[in-house]
Image (spheres, rainbow, N blue to C red):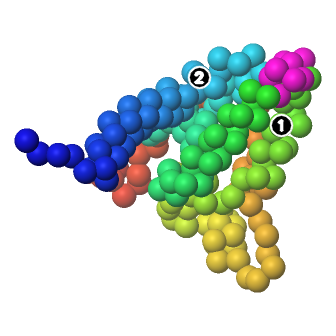
């Protein structure tokens, strides 16, 4: 009969323990990463409802940008993504129980979010912003942001401030316009 060495037992024990811990962590991250989960807090209902009526949900391309797309770093930056997701979650839970939903001011939270946004967060989805047919001014404005000179600090949300989280009496649905070059096909 073979005798197990102490290091081998520790490795087996580590594998047996790490699998359920990893699975539970992954499951928790997936379940808490939906807009519906964010809206489960009363404080976030306004943000959720105004997001649902915005062009980030209702657009001709059928693309949906959810809470994490804008409010967290790209998932490829794994350590920073998990750190920020955890920090945001803990902060929101603490604010909920310490201050309560009455003390939550959407305008103040919106300004804090705008200050924290980085252009890379918008460019996760909006990659081809230098080619906008029939909108030369927009292409030039985007060029000044993408190829900014030293000391020039301009954020996407400086110009695109009112796209999401504004009360609207209607859904801001945008039709996909066929490309002029494809119209003759």
In the image, taking residue 23 as reference, residue 48 lies left or right, namely right
What residue did someone put label 2 on? Answer: 37
Question: Which quadrant of the figure has residue 123?
Answer: bottom right
Q: Residue at x 74, y 27 (%)?
A: 93
Q: Are marks 2 and 1 in contact (CB under 8 Å)?
A: no
Can you tell which mark lies on residue 182? none
Task: Residue 36 in the image: state x and y as whole percent.
Answer: 57, 21
Q: Quadrant of the N terminus?
A: top left
**Circle 1 crowding by C-alpha within 10 Å: few under 14, some 14–19, many from 20:** few
Q: Is residue 40 visible?
A: yes
> Residue 76's x, y, as percent?
47, 56
Instruction: Say if 138 sits above or below 23 in the image.
Output: below
- Which residue lies most toward the bottom here? 150
What is the secondary structure assignment of the residue under circle 2?
helix
Q: Dot 1 lies on which element? A: helix
Query: Closest to the observer: 39 or 62?
Result: 39
Q: Which mark, residue 109?
A: 1
Q: Is residue 136 visible?
A: no
**What predominant SS class does the magenta segment belong to?**
helix
| Residue at 32% across, 36% down | 16
Q: Residue at x 79, y 28 (%)?
A: 94
- Up-down: is 39 above or below 62? above
**Residue 153 horizontal/vertical position (percent):** 79, 70
Residue 101, magenta (yes or no): yes
- In this view, the residue in front, 55 or 138, is 55
Question: Residue 19 colored magenta?
Answer: no
Q: Position of residue 39 (x, y in %)?
A: 65, 21
Residue 33 image-quadrant placement: top right
N-terminal of the pair, mark 2 or mark 1, is 2
Q: Label 2, label 1: how many angstroms apart (C-alpha)?
A: 18 Å
Q: Which region is colored magenta? A: 95-102
């Amino acid at each position: 009969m073979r005798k197990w060495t102490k290091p081998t037992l520790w490795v087996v024990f580590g594998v047996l323990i790490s699998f359920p811990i990893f699975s539970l962590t992954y499951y928790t991250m997936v379940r808490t990463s939906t807009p519906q989960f964010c809206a489960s807090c009363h404080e976030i209902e306004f943000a959720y409802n105004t997001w649902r009526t915005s062009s980030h949900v209702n657009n001709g391309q059928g693309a949906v940008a959810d809470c994490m797309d804008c409010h967290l770093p790209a998932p490829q930056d794994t350590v920073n993504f998990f750190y920020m997701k955890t920090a945001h979650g803990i902060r929101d839970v603490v604010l909920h129980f310490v201050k309560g939903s009455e003390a939550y001011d959407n305008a103040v939270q919106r300004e804090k979010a705008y200050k924290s946004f980085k252009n890379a967060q918008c460019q996760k989805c909006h990659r081809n912003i230098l080619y906008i047919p029939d909108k030369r001014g927009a292409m030039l404005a985007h060029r000044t942001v993408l190829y900014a000179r030293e000391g020039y600090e301009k954020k996407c949300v400086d110009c695109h401030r009112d796209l999401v989280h504004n009360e609207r009496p209607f859904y801001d649905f945008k039709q996909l316009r066929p490309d002029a070059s494809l119209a003759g096909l």
